[in-house]
């Protein structure tokens, strides 16, 4: 009789545990770059409708995403700064690209419309070095004859957090502006000579929109969503180009994804390339303590590659080409459980 009383309790407890485990498997967590946050949010909402699985993504900056995946507090990390193959090996991690986009200078100047102002590497670097401090500086007037540039102090805005957008912005300036490379360099966080800090692409967008005579840099989807005034930028071939998905795609054309997923696509050749283009990356551990979670992460991104291209394009990201997706899917075989069995689904 005692056994009969306990048995249903054991069954109930087991059922509760099973249900809890199933519920846990129905939610995956990620954190990191704010650059791709709009498309990850869209994909997550659509994926939840299609499958019932919840994807909880926190936009905390690439530096935060790297820290979170290093400490295994999320199922995947996200960074716009790719990790070198050597760093990945030392950490026991893998990475793969999700989408391609662009970092764009934005301004808030009365009377200046999107795409009217021209900048080049020299003037952009000099503004953020604090060498050009007023909008009617002769160097800016020479690039923009006839544009009503005000006699007003420039208010630079940059990221306050560890940021892949900052990495790509400073990587670009380090490639094209020798003084910037010598004095500041590149990284997810640098010692800025001037400027006020905003947290995330969201924070920089809000800061620039409310601060007259400001200039900042944000991912292009934030430009579109917030109706910001973007500048044209002179590329490596000497052309002043506007940011759009075709310009990002042109910049990515020379990337050799079969060789390595560590690809930097700033300052690429080509008449139509956007100079500050980038891919954004997903980071995962190669050896998985929670293989069922890793499988769910891969199912999510597999779904996104197959079904999320239209949403990505509508938000002005460039979906990964089918040939690159095939290379990415093949690389997932490196992600295994503690027994050495691949976690990727068939």
Image (spheres, rainbow, N blue to C red):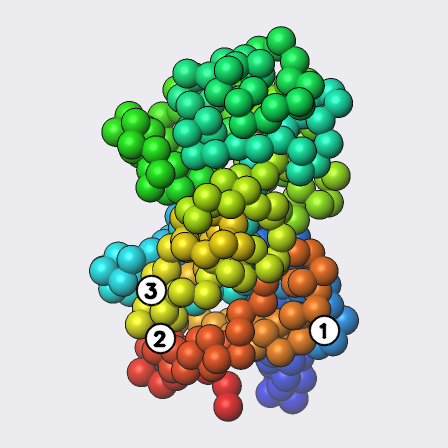
* Crowd around label 2: few <14 · some 14–19 · many ≥20 (10 Å): few
Q: Who comes first in sequence, dot 3 or dot 1?
A: 1
Give how far across and how far down residue 47 sits, in percent.
69, 70
**80 above or below 338?**
above
Q: Which mark is residue 52?
A: 1
Give how far across and how far down residue 88 sits, in percent.
29, 61
* Crowd around label 1: few <14 · some 14–19 · many ≥20 (10 Å): few
Residue 216 found in image quarter? top right
Relative to 309, is 273 on the left or the right? left
Q: Residue at x 57, y 33 (%)?
A: 118
Relative to 171, is 58 on the left or the right? right
Give how far across and how far down residue 49 sits, in percent.
76, 71
Q: Residue at x 44, y 49 (%)?
A: 237
Judging by the rendered image, the residue that carries numbered circle 2 is: 258
Q: Which one is nearer the viewer's eye here, 285 or 223?
A: 223
How many labels were placed on the picture?
3
Q: Who comes first in sequence, dot 2 or dot 1?
A: 1
* Foreground label between 3 and 1: 3
- Spatial CA distance of label 2 from label 1 is 34 Å
**174 above or below 76?**
above
Judging by the rendered image, the residue that carries numbered circle 3 is: 93
> Secondary structure under badge 1?
loop
- Spatial CA distance of label 3 from label 1 is 28 Å
Q: Residue at x 67, y 42 (%)?
A: 223
């Amino acid at each position: 009789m005692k056994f009969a009383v306990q048995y249903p309790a054991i069954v109930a407890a087991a059922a509760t545990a099973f249900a809890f485990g199933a519920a846990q498997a129905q939610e995956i967590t990620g954190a990191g770059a704010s650059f791709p946050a709009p498309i990850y949010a869209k994909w997550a909402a659509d994926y939840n409708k299609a499958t019932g699985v919840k994807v909880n993504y926190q936009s905390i900056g690439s530096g935060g995403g790297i820290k979170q995946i290093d400490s295994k507090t999320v199922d995947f990390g996200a960074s716009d700064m790719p990790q070198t193959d050597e760093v990945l090996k030392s950490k026991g991690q893998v990475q793969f690209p999700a989408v391609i986009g662009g970092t764009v200078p934005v301004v808030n100047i009365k009377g200046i419309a999107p795409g009217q102002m021209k900048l080049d590497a020299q003037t952009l670097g000099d503004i953020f070095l604090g060498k050009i401090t007023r909008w009617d500086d002769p160097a800016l007037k020479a690039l923009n004859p006839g544009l009503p540039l005000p006699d007003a102090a420039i208010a630079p805005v940059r990221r306050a957090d560890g940021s892949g957008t900052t990495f790509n912005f400073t990587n670009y300036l380090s490639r094209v502006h020798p003084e910037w490379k010598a004095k500041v360099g590149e990284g997810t966080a640098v010692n800025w000579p001037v400027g006020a800090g905003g947290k995330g692409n969201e924070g920089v967008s809000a800061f620039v929109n409310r601060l007259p005579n400001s200039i900042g840099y944000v991912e292009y989807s934030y430009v579109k969503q917030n109706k910001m005034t973007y500048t044209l930028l002179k590329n490596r071939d000497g052309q002043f180009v506007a940011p759009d998905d075709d310009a990002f795609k042109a910049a990515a054309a020379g990337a050799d994804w079969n060789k390595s997923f560590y690809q930097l696509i700033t300052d690429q050749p080509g008449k139509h390339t956007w100079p500050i283009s980038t891919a954004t990356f997903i980071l995962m551990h190669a050896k998985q303590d929670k293989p069922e979670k890793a499988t769910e992460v891969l199912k999510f991104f597999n779904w996104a590659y197959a079904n999320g291209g239209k949403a990505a394009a509508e938000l002005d990201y460039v979906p990964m080409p089918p040939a690159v997706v095939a290379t990415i899917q093949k690389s997932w075989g490196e992600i295994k459980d503690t027994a050495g069995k691949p976690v990727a689904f068939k």
